[in-house]
Amino acid sequence: MKRHIVSVGLFLLLALAFAVCAAPAATESAEKKMSKKAAKLMSQALEAIQAKQPDTAIDILIQVIALEPENAMVRHNLGVLYFEKGLPEEAISNFEVALQLQPDYQNALLALRQALFEAGKTAGAQGDHEKANVALLKLESLPLPPSENKGLRASAFYLLGYNFFNLKQYTKAIEYFGKCQSVEGLEQDSMDLYANATYFLGMMGHIQGQYEASNTNFRKYLSLFAAADAKPEFYAHAHYFVGANLFRLLEARMAKGEVAGMAEATAEILPYLNAAVENKIPSEDAHVMLGNCYVYQKDYEKAVQAYQRLIELFPQSQQLKNYQAFLSELQKMLPQAAPGKKKR
């Protein structure tokens, strides 16, 4: 079955501001006065910003840095301009230098974390999941500012999980989707993000054959939207996975010769698979398992209907001959109509 990717809205959490006069923190390095020439250039840079001439402002700030190489505020402001121009690598480099010059510079730390997040989000959207994780793992290694919106941290964890999922590094994906879920208050503050992390944790369990753990997450996902009028795009897929997990568990029991409780087991599975096929998820497996469940219940008429629908929907299937042969056998098991009475 195709693994569907759930898209998630992420957050722009930091409004980066151009600061000229205010010292970033009360430290000796920040309090040092600029030379008259550097101060004049800073005024010119501010005028360029106000005139919406960022390239001119960048050129001027580079001149200021040549005069004031130890000034963290100038580095931060240059990083802001690069960030707003859509040049995350240049922005990140300047924010990092600002923090090296002044480790307690909270504005630079917030800006660096935001820039790393945006760089990771952009690379991931372009399909470069390894590059995305370089930026996001660097973000994770930084101190956590108390003033930062916790949504950024949760979103970074989610993106790390999503990237590791696409790289098929499922153990790491589970780790980071779990970290996303565990951010305090996430279920209340950003239920969609929490739900999507839950969905992917269910996927990881299914892929790794951990069907009971998978169902814990998929049932949680379904419960989050049970009362909602509008269901998310992958609500039907979650039903499929619950049904598929239960079916695999039933198969494992049957392989051990444990056939007691078959009717109860299939009765639990059927509503999930029916919900999946009624919502037309593109899966042969859903129809096959549905038909098999009806066979286990000895409801051959519904089993025939399920396999007929399977053949109609997937005429190009490589298993088509097998399905047709099985359907033929099922049809032989249907009760025959009573023969009409002969006329005298």
Image (cartoon, rainbow, N blue to C red):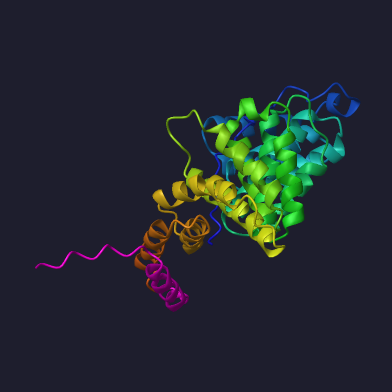
Residue with the most extreme left position:
344
Quadrant containing the N terminus in the rendered view: bottom right
Residue 282 in view (yes/no): yes
Tell me if 229 is positioned left or right of 266 in this view.
Answer: left
Quadrant containing the C terminus in the rendered view: bottom left
In the rendered image, which quarter is residue 127 located in?
A: bottom right
Q: Nearer the viewer, residue 178 or 294?
A: 294
Q: Nearer the viewer, residue 311 or 283?
A: 311
User: Would you say residue 190 sits in the magenta stretch?
Assistant: no
Q: Nearer the viewer, residue 298 or 50?
A: 298
Image spot of residue 49 (x, y percent):
57, 33
Magenta-colored span: 317-344
User: Would you say residue 339 sits in the magenta stretch?
Assistant: yes
Is 269 located above or below residue 50 in the figure? below
Tell me if 1 is positioned left or right of 76 in this view.
Answer: left
Residue with the most extreme front position:
344
Q: Residue shown at 63%/25% (left/top)?
A: 188
Image spot of residue 69 (x, y percent):
82, 41
